Image (tube, helix red, strand yellow):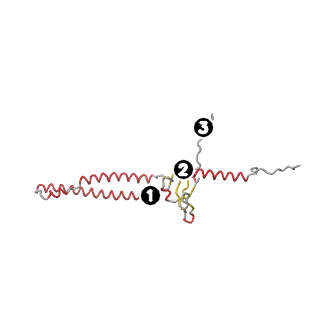
Amino acid sequence: MSKPQQQQVPPFPNKYQVRLVASSDSKPCIICYKPATTVLLAEGNGDFFYTCQQHLKDEQFANSIHPQEYTDLVNSQKELTTKKVQLEKDVELEKPYIWNKVTGYWKNDKEKSEDSKNNDNLSKYEKLKNELKEVMKELDEKNKLISEFKFKQYKLNQDIYKNRLMIHQKKVYGQQRAVKIQQEGFFPSAPSHNLE
């Protein structure tokens, strides 16, 4: 019976941090070969490569790791969205209709006192409308913050990550081979005995 194979631990995890370099230090992007100033650096400095900022938005290349700050923004956006929907319903329920104004012209004095109650409804409608405007403004600010959020950590797509591991393995193998070539006894030596 053969031994079960142990799973090899990769030399670096699939967690990359974004770093920016000066434009004078830019190198070609690994995808499109244009000069890039964005560097993805693996945790533990095991791997790094240059890429364009646009490629980081491509989900087939890398996915952002959401920090707690971003998660809080998204949660508050969801809460504001539900609050907005509820306020829109409330505003629609409290909305004064034109029919009420038309019939108000033919009311007598007793009905005019009831009309003051309608004014309370109107003021309630205005309050709800103002509150809805505030929520909409706050929601727009949250959406803007979310769209402009700068992620600092990314996880590469599995295929891209495997490619990075293969490149790393080739580099290590090349270094080991260069050391072996320099060692004595790697190449066969010419015969040293006399031929008779």
- At mark 2, the secondary structure is helix
Question: Which residue sits furthest bottom?
Answer: 24
Image spot of residue 39 (x, y percent):
54, 58
- At mark 1, the secondary structure is loop
The residue tagged 2 is 159
Most foreground residue, 177 or 47: 177
Mark with earlier residue (3, 2) = 3
Of discs 2 and 1, which sits in the foreground?
Answer: 2
Most foreground residue, 189 or 138: 189
Mark with earlier residue (1, 3) = 3
The residue tagged 1 is 149
The residue tagged 3 is 4
* Image quadrant containing the N terminus: top right
Quarter occupied by residue 118: bottom left
Look at label 2 and name its amino acid.
Asp
Residue ID at (62%, 36%): 3
